[in-house]
Image: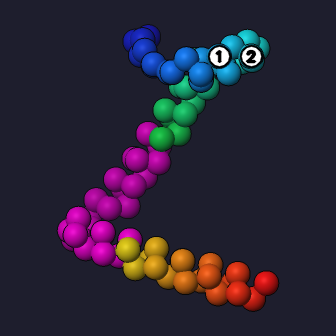
Amino acid sequence: MPTVTVSVDEQLKRRMEKHPEINWSEVTRQAIEEKISELELLDELTADSTLSAEDAAEISERVDENVRAEFDRLREDE
């Protein structure tokens, strides 16, 4: 099996060392596997898309604006 090296800063390493019962290699492997699965699904969903990167950015901005407006509305209702 190939080996991948992951670097972490000293603070994170100290925090990890407080939990020696955890197999950090396995945690990392699972996180990578999950992210790859998400990316593969995204690739599948967008394979036939005719949207340009600019179109996607515009849609994202509109969604962000709508979510922010809804959040603000809900806070006003509290």
Q: Residues within 10 Å of mark 2 (few under 14, many from 20)?
A: few
Q: Amino acid at mark 2?
A: Lys
Distance of label 2 from label 1 (alpha carbons): 7 Å
Q: Is residue 23 visible?
A: no
Q: Quadrant of residue 20?
A: top right
Instruction: Choose between 36 and 15: the one closer to the eye.
Output: 15
Residue type at mark 1 is Arg
Count of number-bearing discs? 2
Along the viewing direction, whichever of 26 and 6 lies nearer the viewer: 6
Q: Is residue 14 left or right of residue 49?
A: right
The residue that disc 1 covers is 14
Q: Quadrant of the C terminus?
A: bottom right
Quarter holding residue 56: bottom left
The residue shown at (75%, 88%) is 77
The spot of residue 34 in percent (x, y) is 53, 39
Query: Magenta residues?
Result: 36-60
**Magenta segment: does it hold 58?**
yes
The x, y position of residue 50, in whole percent, is 21, 71
Left or right, 5 with reference to 18: left
Residue picked out by circle 2? 18
- Rendered-image quadrant of the N terminus: top left
What residue appears at the point 25 percent right and 73 percent down from the top-left corner? 55
**Magenta stretch secondary structure, dominant:** helix
Q: Is residue 66 above or below residue 3?
A: below
- Taking the view exactly as shown, the residue that stands out farthest to the right is 78
Mark 1, secondary structure of its residue = helix
